[in-house]
Image (cartoon, rainbow, N blue to C red):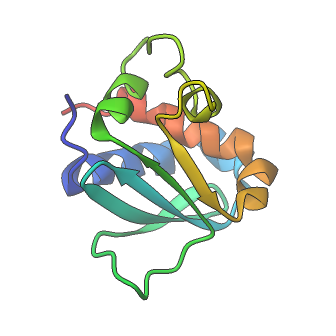
């Protein structure tokens, strides 16, 4: 199971920033997103599809447009090379029948940039431990 620690997130950040498709799809994607992997939480700042900053220390002053919160076990299934059913994307994981992922905040920003955001999240599957 991935640790979802700071080093893991930094490897994911590097993958997103080196991916030409992420930059193309995300050319209008600017948002601060809270990603919560069980006990690990980060505010990831996207700018034109690239991740320009990851805030590791989260406090009351941490600002973000929307948040994705799920247990680390849920994210571990999502990041498998071939995820099991209902863990293949954030829409399936947040479905009311499944309810393993909570999406909160200004979801309009997420919907407006869903393709770019989903592409960046899918790159998590290639992060090596």
Side of 111 where 14 appears, left or right: left
Residue 76 rendering spot, x and y as whole percentages:
31, 29
Residue 56 rendering spot, x and y as whole percentages:
29, 69
Residue at the farthest front position = 97
Is 113 rendered above or below residue 124? below
What residue lies at 72% left-to-right and 39% top-to-bottom? 115
Q: Can residue 28 be seen here?
A: no
Residue 108 rendering spot, x and y as whole percentages:
79, 58
What residue lies at 54% left-to-right and 26% top-to-bottom? 98
Count numbered badges in the picture.
0
Residue at the farthest bottom position = 61
Is 11 rendered above or below residue 63? above
In this orientation, which residue lies closer to the viewer: 50 or 125? Answer: 125
Is 51 rendered above or below residue 99? below
What residue lies at 56% left-to-right and 57% top-to-bottom? 50
In this orientation, which residue lies closer to the viewer: 126 or 2? Answer: 2
Side of 83 where 29 appears, left or right: right
Side of 70 where 116 appears, left or right: right
Side of 103 where 59 appears, left or right: left
In this orientation, which residue lies closer to the viewer: 109 or 125? Answer: 109
Q: Can residue 54 be seen here?
A: yes
What residue lies at 24% left-to-right and 54% top-to-bottom? 39
**Quarter of the view holding residue 12:** top left
**Quarter of the view holding residue 78:** top left
* Quadrant that contains the C terminus: top left
* Quadrant that contains the N terminus: top left
Residue 93 rendering spot, x and y as whole percentages:
54, 30
């Amino acid at each position: 199971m991935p640790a979802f620690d700071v080093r893991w997130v930094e490897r994911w950040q590097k993958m997103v920033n080196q991916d030409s498709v992420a930059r193309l799809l995300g050319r209008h994607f600017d948002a601060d997103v809270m990603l919560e992997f069980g006990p690990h939480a980060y505010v990831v700042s996207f700018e034109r599809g690239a991740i320009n900053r990851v805030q590791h220390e989260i406090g009351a002053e941490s600002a973000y447009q929307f948040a994705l919160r799920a247990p680390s076990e849920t994210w571990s299934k999502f990041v498998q090379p071939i995820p099991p059913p209902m863990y293949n994307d954030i829409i399936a994981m947040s479905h009311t029948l499944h309810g393993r992922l909570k999406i909160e905040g200004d979801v309009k920003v997420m919907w407006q940039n869903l393709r770019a955001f989903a592409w960046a999240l899918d790159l998590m599957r290639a992060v090596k431990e």
